[in-house]
Amino acid sequence: MDFSNLNKKASDSFYKQRNMLKQLAQGKTLKCEKCNGVLTLDLATSESGKGLVKCKKGCTDIALELGA
């Protein structure tokens, strides 16, 4: 089996999300690809060591593990 195409897609997705997190952390305004709502970065969630990137409608909802 050739997994190169799947690996390429996974790699592209990782770098896209990493760049999105960098931009949000810098205070830039980004829009959800599906609903065009503003994305928010919440690092002060109720769970210690967790963060969240989301839009109001919930179509973008990315849970983050924050390392110590």
Image (cartoon, grey):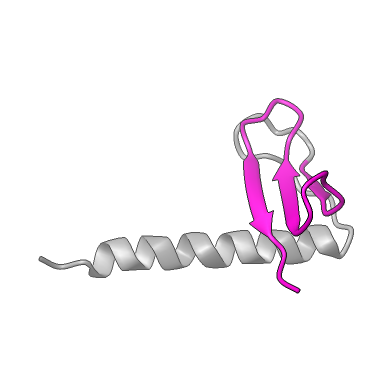
22 or 66: which is nearer to us?
66
> In which quadrant is the C terminus drawn?
bottom right
**Residue 67 image position (x, y, % from top left):** 71, 70
16 or 54: which is nearer to us?
54
Residue placed at 76% from the left, 29% from the top?
56
Please say if 12 is above or below 64.
below
**Residue 62 image position (x, y, % from top left):** 63, 47
Residue 64 placement: quadrant: bottom right
Q: Is residue 13 rendered to the left or right of residue 40?
A: left
Please say if 21 is above or below 62.
below
Of all residues, the one furthest to the left in this rendering is 1
56 or 47: which is nearer to us?
47
Of all residues, the one furthest to the top in this rendering is 57
Of all residues, the one furthest to the bottom in this rendering is 68
> In which quadrant is the N terminus drawn?
bottom left
Please say if 40 is above or below 18.
above
Please say if 25 is above or below 39.
below
Q: Is residue 50 rendered to the left or right of residue 44?
A: left
Residue placed at 63% from the left, 38% from the top?
60
**Residue 48 image position (x, y, % from top left):** 79, 55
**Residue 14 image position (x, y, % from top left):** 52, 64
Q: Is residue 55 magenta?
A: yes
Residue placed at 79% from the left, 38% from the top?
38
Q: Is residue 15 magenta?
A: no
Residue placed at 80% from the left, 57% from the top?
24
Q: Is residue 13 rendered to the left or right of residue 61?
A: left
Q: Is residue 21 rendered to the left or right of residue 33?
A: right
How many numbered discs? 0
Magenta-tinted stretch: 39-68
Residue 65 placement: quadrant: bottom right
